[in-house]
Image (tube, coloured by chain):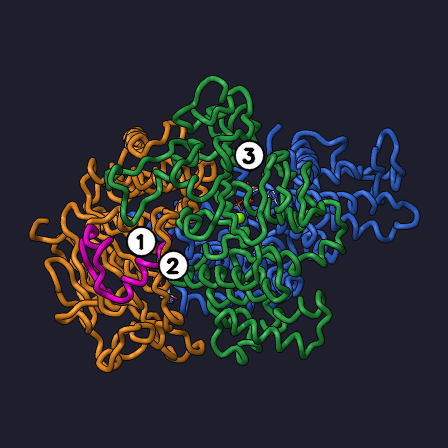
Chain colours: A orange, B green, C blue
Amino acid sequence: MSQQPILDVQDIVKYFPVAGGLWSKPKAWIKAVDGISFQVYKGESFGLVGESGCGKTTLGRTILRLIEPTSGSIKLNGREITRLNQREMRALRRDVQMIFQDPQASLDPRMKVASIVTEPLRAFQKTGRQQLRDRALNLLEKVGLKADALDKYPHAFSGGERQRIGIARALCLNPSLIVADEPVSALDMSIQAQVLNLLGDLKTSFDFSSLIISHDLSVINHMCDRIAVMYLGVIVEMAPSNMFGRIQRHPYTAALVSAVPTPDPHKKQSPITLEGEIPSPVNPPPGCLFHTRCTYCFEHCRVERPTLVEIQAGHTVACWLNNGRGL
Amino acid sequence: MSSALLEIQDLTVSFQTSQGVRRAVEQVSLYIEEGETLGLVGESGCGKSVTALSVLGLVDRSTGLIESGRILFKGKNLLDLNTEALRRLRGNAISMVFQEPMTSLNPVLPVGRQIAEPLMTHQGLSKIEAYASAMTWLERVKIPMARKRMQEYPHQLSGGMRQRVMIAMAMVCSPSLLMADEPTTALDVSTQAQILHLIEKLKADLKMSVLFITHDLGIVAQTAKRVVVMYAGQVVEAASVTDIFDRPAHPYTRGLLRSIPRMQPPTDVPKKRLQEIKGTLPSLDIIIPGCRFADRCPEVFEPCRQKKPDLSPVQAGQQARCWLYADGSGKP
Amino acid sequence: MNKHLKNINFRCGLVLTAVVVLAAAVSFFWTPYDANRMDPGHRLEAPSFYHLLGTDQYGRDILSRVMVGAVNSIFVGLATVVIGMVAGVVLGLIAAYIGKWADESIMRLSDLLFGFPAVLTAILISAIWGPSISNVMVAIGIFYIPVFTRLTRAVALGIWGREFIEAARASGASEWAITFRHVLPNLLSPLIIQATIQFAVAVLAEAGLSYLGLGTQPPHASWGRMLYEAQTFMEISPWMCIFPGLAIAWTVLGFNLLGDGIRDNLDPYML
Ligand SMILES: Nc1ncnc2c1ncn2[C@@H]1O[C@H](COP(=O)(O)OP(=O)(O)O)[C@@H](O)[C@H]1O
Ligand SMILES: Nc1ncnc2c1ncn2[C@@H]1O[C@H](COP(=O)(O)OP(=O)(O)O)[C@@H](O)[C@H]1O
Ligand SMILES: [Mg+2]
Ligand SMILES: [Mg+2]
């Protein structure tokens, strides 16, 4: 890991208004992302994992400024981007691209593949027709699609192939950071492995850093070097992935890991069952956000929200239990 | 297999589509014994739901056709029953839980009423008795404040809660067979764990059999006693859960097991690369002369592309639809 | 066979409209008789070998007049749809893209226009500028603006919310590029469908207004005008009203079927 992070996120907050009447002020706020900080270093794969509704997508889109953050700072290659105007921001998009969850929805059904994959290129420089086609061809080859795909429309492809098209588009300008929001969640089992391998291979050949978002712990664990676990808009634990499969210090992470069914009939699991449901992000509990479902909860947890504390090199946990002790 | 509660023999179902006739399910055979959980596993579109829907006669009448086969439930062929007899069976002796509870619950009726309904129609309970029973069921599926929830509508409940309501509805008449069609696919892992636990517990309490349909090999390993693997409309392998995971016979099953990312990868697999199955799923609209997996199979040889393989025994209790085992020796 | 042609609506619509367009095109070069030439010797003649559809009270050949009337109808249809569509698409896109006050004011304005009866607009316009075919076109065209504005706005809002727009934005595409490369192409199919239907409505409206004497002025041939003139002779020479009436019904049906057919065909999976 080098010194300067590619992406440096500090205290990002995103609240969505709950619409009141047509003309009135919002009644309340959905606290989708509530103070998140992390860094992604060069060459690294950083994973964000958490259950649906915990704010992963909102965070990912905020980092690309597809959504405006309520507050906080985002530095891309050392440059603060939250205050850039639309034109300046657009110029910056060369360097950071996105892969979307739904390969069907994220490709324009009325555009041919050749135009789709070269869209980033056309956005930034005047390029001749032949050059565009050459680039498209080159990209398709890189993601394992045949040349005859160029002049077809997205509907002619299977889900896995469409995701390859989406990946080719993201790679078009050799970005230094790729944000992938659930890149394999919509794919079939036997196709998931292909796309995961492809992303791994491309990462080596194109040399980008990535921020991978997924609800699937095994996917994140497989793909990422470091992992952050989110709950209700905050990060509760952050650790390198090799540590992640074994030691978890946050009760939520421990429950999450134990709930993933192991594909091994000889290891019968007894998951740590969490009581109740995730509280609403409109009315998050005071103190530690997880205290309403935590079996270890004590007095202090109800009062003050814990911050991320480093308990080991590269391993941080936001839990009052871990200020010195462990689970 | 006289002890089988449900036995499907050579079921073939096709649909009329704009592209022509689509064989969604071809010669599917499986059985479920009393009190056991059978895992039916396969990728989306491989025919799992159609197989389950055929049991209850719920395959879309206008386009779907059960071409052949028998579905024996307690020895009686369900395909011979008329609609009225089938209706009496549904939600009574055989019930089903679907992936997306929102589409199978009635949005304009309170959930209490929906749970009580089958009791009144199938068991002739009075309204008061049925509602009382419905409420105990809501408590049994661990819905907090059951009395209040009785009056609520499906949209007022969370996804996990709705799935609990669906399960309560499926359970009220104490079915002898529960068909759970991807009941946790739309849920988060922690909610999934709760629902799996609930189904497991109810199964033990009511001594029923469960057909658990899923695409998640982890769930299969954790819940099923025997497993049937489907691929492109066919059963490709059937075996006990330990054989499937320890000695998978069909190249597809083997490939699948190697291709899934694991929390703790087995030591022989380098972490950063999965062993993928090449190629894409075949279209069901094209008739393939040989094995449907041949194009993606690493072990393909001459007969595979010429003739359809049958389910051949591999060892006691294990069968695979693969030419490797066609000589009956059980060895590739 | 072409996939589109499999659709029965599309096929029928295409045949019906093709006949009308062909008749109009041919009439530029050739009609059986001069459409406006009076022939007192052959007044109110029933259909015969010489006059396939008969003659009117001045002895003019009805087939020729129906053919020339087709030009008139097509012209009105085209012009009104173009006026309505161009203005409507621009306004609709502005409303959808800017939102807030722009959306509010554009939508209220189009409500106002929409609430105003077309016939009344036409009467008003003819009262001010005098009755003429161009005024009819302007009147109907204005009436079409809110139709296309609403459609464009509704569809564009939907498209702007789709994920591929966000993907384009994340790729670095400018808002102009997004509008022209993604929004407009996806708008095209609903617009074409609407256009064919409005075309049919315009043919009907022009006929109605000409019938009222507000549209095409004599001696020019217009189906509505022909119907109006025919009513006095209904009993003695019914062919005078049957054939223009049939032409109107034929055209309206043709364009409606075409619209339905396109709608069925424009499932993106059939491109
Ligand atoms: N555009 C929006 N307007 C209002 N609320 C939103 C919007 N997008 C997301 N949310 C809310 O923010 C929370 C986090 O959502 P999301 O980021 O999509 O979670 P995840 O991707 O982890 O499933 C959810 O409660 C969701 O309802
Ligand atoms: N009503 C229907 N009409 C046409 N095809 C259908 C219909 N229902 C299912 N199919 C087809 O049958 C195949 C199997 O579907 P299904 O049993 O739902 O798969 P899954 O294993 O995901 O549950 C799919 O290819 C699907 O397209
Ligand atoms: Mg998300
Ligand atoms: Mg299914």
Mark nearest the camera among 3 and 1 is 1
Amino acid, disc 1: Leu
Which SS class for mark 1? Answer: helix
In terms of image quadrants, where is residue C104? bottom left
Instruction: Decide which of C201, B26 is in the foreground and name it.
Output: B26
Q: Chain of mark 3?
A: B
Tell me, yes or no, whether dots 2 and 3 are on the same chain: yes
Instruction: Decide which of C198, A271 is in the foreground and name it.
Output: A271
| Residue C126 percent location from the top left of the image | 64, 60
Cα–Cα span, label 2 and label 1: 9 Å
| Residue A326 percent location from the top left of the image | 18, 67
- Disc marking residue B284: 3
Q: Chain of mark 2?
A: B
Label 1, residues with CA under 10 Å away: few <14, some 14-19, many ≥20 = many
Q: Which residue is mark 2?
A: B189
Which residue is at a point 59% across and 62% down the rendered structure image?
Answer: B170
| Residue C41 percent location from the top left of the image | 88, 36
Q: Which residue is mark 1?
A: A217
Cα–Cα span, label 3 and label 1: 32 Å
Which SS class for mark 3? Answer: loop
